[in-house]
């Protein structure tokens, strides 16, 4: 079953065509499908959290976080445009990104542990691209679909020391117009708490974070659809500003 689900998702990516939700029966099966996709993927850049903010939970109709992996080949470089023709239905959202300075794993990891293990934090833009038509899915379905991972862009990391990531202001703009604002606390009360939740959850499967991993801590606002000609700008206090042009 998991191999069939994974193959259907891979075909949707290859065809750049949305499909109906798969009807994955439960979260355990969803993560099993995701592991099939992970095995088939190239080298990983790190991990991503999804559905960590109330805004995002309301937008997609789910009620708790999920996580997925980041394939290195899906990373965008600063200044590189987003090729929307390679995606199905791209949407952009603002992120606070952690860069791990050392390994971090185990069932009792706290937000303080995450901050201590991070060599830097950065502003990020995640480009979502659900393989399901109109972003309609259940929690097991979206987990199987690697939490709608598409592309991602990470700014220059800065040391986390002295930055209260709960309180930093976040601004999302599209084509010069304000789309949404938030604070870091939109992600489970603190972005590092969201990452700690993920590490604790991963521990059950023997997974964890490694030095050098990039971790997207969850979208801080609802995601905005993008098309050729659009320009998305994300600003996070103390962390900087990123611009992404869409072609």
Image (tube, rainbow, N blue to C red):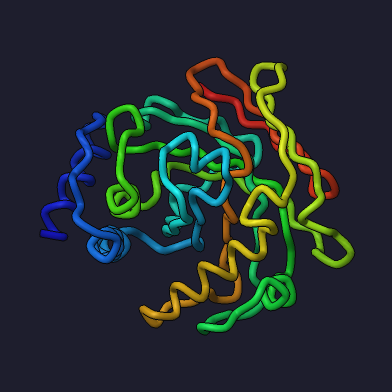
| Residue 40 on image: x %, y % | 26, 60
Is residue 204 positioned above or below 24 on the image?
A: below
On the rendered structure, is 214 left or right of 202? right
Q: Residue at x 16, y 50 (%)?
A: 7
Q: Residue 12: which quarter of the image?
A: top left
| Residue 42 on image: x %, y % | 36, 60
Q: Residue at x 62, y 31 (%)?
A: 244
Is residue 224 positioned above or below 158 on the image?
A: above
Please, which residue is most extreme toward the right here?
Answer: 162
On the rendered structure, is 137 left or right of 92? left
| Residue 229 on image: x %, y % | 55, 15
Q: Residue at x 53, y 45 (%)?
A: 152
| Residue 189 on image: x %, y % | 68, 56
Asked whether 106 or 74 is in front, the reply is 106
Q: Residue 231: which quarter of the image?
A: top right
Q: Residue at x 45, y 47 (%)?
A: 74
The quadrant of the picture occupied by the N terminus is bottom left
Instruction: Give the tally of numbered discs.
Output: 0
């Amino acid at each position: 079953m998991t191999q069939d689900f994974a193959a259907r998702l891979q075909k949707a990516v290859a065809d750049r065509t949305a499909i109906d939700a798969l009807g994955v029966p439960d979260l355990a099966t969803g993560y099993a499908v995701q592991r099939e996709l992970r095995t088939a993927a190239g080298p990983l850049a790190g991990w991503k959290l999804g559905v960590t903010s109330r805004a995002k939970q309301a937008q997609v109709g789910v009620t708790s976080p999920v996580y997925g992996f980041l394939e290195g080949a899906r990373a965008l470089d600063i200044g590189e445009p987003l090729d929307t023709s390679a995606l199905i239905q791209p949407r952009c959202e603002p992120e606070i990104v952690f860069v791990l300075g050392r390994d971090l794993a185990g069932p009792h990891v706290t937000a303080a542990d995450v901050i201590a293990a991070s060599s830097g934090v950065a502003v990020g833009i995640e480009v979502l691209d659900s393989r399901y038509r109109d972003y309609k899915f259940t929690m097991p379905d979206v987990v199987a679909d690697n939490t709608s991972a598409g592309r991602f862009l990470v700014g220059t990391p800065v040391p986390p020391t002295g930055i209260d990531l709960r309180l930093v202001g976040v601004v999302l703009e599209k084509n010069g117009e304000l789309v949404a604002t938030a604070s870091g606390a939109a992600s489970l009360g603190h972005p590092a708490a969201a990452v700690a939740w993920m590490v604790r959850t991963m521990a059950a499967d023997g997974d964890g974070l490694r030095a050098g991993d990039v971790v997207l801590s969850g979208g801080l606002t609802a995601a905005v659809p993008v098309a050729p000609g659009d320009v998305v700008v994300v600003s996070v206090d103390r962390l900087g500003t990123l611009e992404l042009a869409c072609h």
